[in-house]
Amino acid sequence: MTWLERVGAFLAHRRVQNVAAEPVEIREALRAGGKTLVFLPQAPELLHPGVSICVTLAGWFGPLALCCVSRDDKLPDLSNSGYPAVLFPWAISRMGLPTRNVREKVKVLAPTIAVDLHPQFNLPTAYLAAESGASLRIGFGDAPSGYFNLRYACPSFDPANSALHYGRFLRTIENLRADTFEEPPT
């Protein structure tokens, strides 16, 4: 990590601490849906399972409510899924954070839910989720406080079994949306 990236991480953490930490009624936020912002993982082996989650979320919250964000220039094609989705690539600055243009683009989307599908903490996407204005921000793994208000713990995320891990994640979210909660099978 360069010194500029360290400065960027420090500034991001300080800024995220100012994000309103108002309580969120998770079940109500998931039932209401609204515009959903999904940050696709960068690893090629996780991209296809990530797109599957986008398709499922579009089915739950409505096709026009979905926006997928990928750092890769080769964005996945969701046209054959039957759900139109806004897809856009993004760039990071020398400080390791998303550029101002990208941050403004995300804020204009005004999502109510932001989901970061990176299996480990990813500063650029976690920062975008926190800055997006989404009341419910969901992330995987451990993250410093402020970035996400709901974290899905998956201690041994194996990319070879990503479909299984993401499937469990979707079942958990589906259970949270339902009236009763059932533990996902192990």
Image (spheres, rainbow, N blue to C red):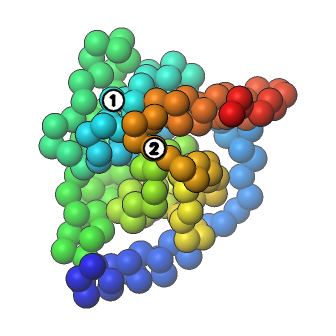
Q: On the rendered image, what quadrant is the C terminus found in?
A: top right
Which numbered dot is residue 158? 2
Does 7 sit left or right of 26 as displayed? left
Q: Residue 85: x, y in percent?
A: 34, 27
| Mark 2 element type | loop
Q: Of circles 2 and 1, which is in front? A: 2
Residue closest to the eye, 22 or 153: 153
- Tell me the residue at 75%/47% (across/down): 25
Is 48 rendered above or below residue 154? above
Q: Residue at 30% across / 68% down in the picture?
A: 97
First of labels 2, 1 by sequence position:
1
- Residue 130 in the figure: left or right of residue 76: right
Rendered-image quadrant of the N terminus: bottom left
Q: Is residue 61 left or right of residue 25?
A: left
Snapshot quadrant of residue 96: bottom left
Q: At x 63% / y 57%, what residue is drawn?
A: 149
Q: Position of residue 42 (x, y in %)?
A: 29, 47
Q: Residue at x 80, y 30 (%)?
A: 182
Answer few, some or many: residues within 10 Å of disc 1's Cα (few below 14, many 20 plus, some between 14 and 19). Answer: some
Q: What is the count of numbered marks?
A: 2
Q: Amino acid at mark 1?
A: His
Q: Alpha-carbon neighbours of circle 2 within 10 Å: few (<14), some, or many (≥20)?
A: few
Q: With respect to residue 143, does 59 lie above or below? A: above
Residue 113 seen: yes
Separation of disc 2 and disc 1 at Cα? Answer: 15 Å
| Amino acid bearing label 2 | Asp
Q: Which residue is mark 1?
A: 48
Q: Position of residue 118 (x, y in %)?
A: 42, 50
Asked if residue 108 shows in the view, the reply is no
Give the SS element for disc 1.
helix
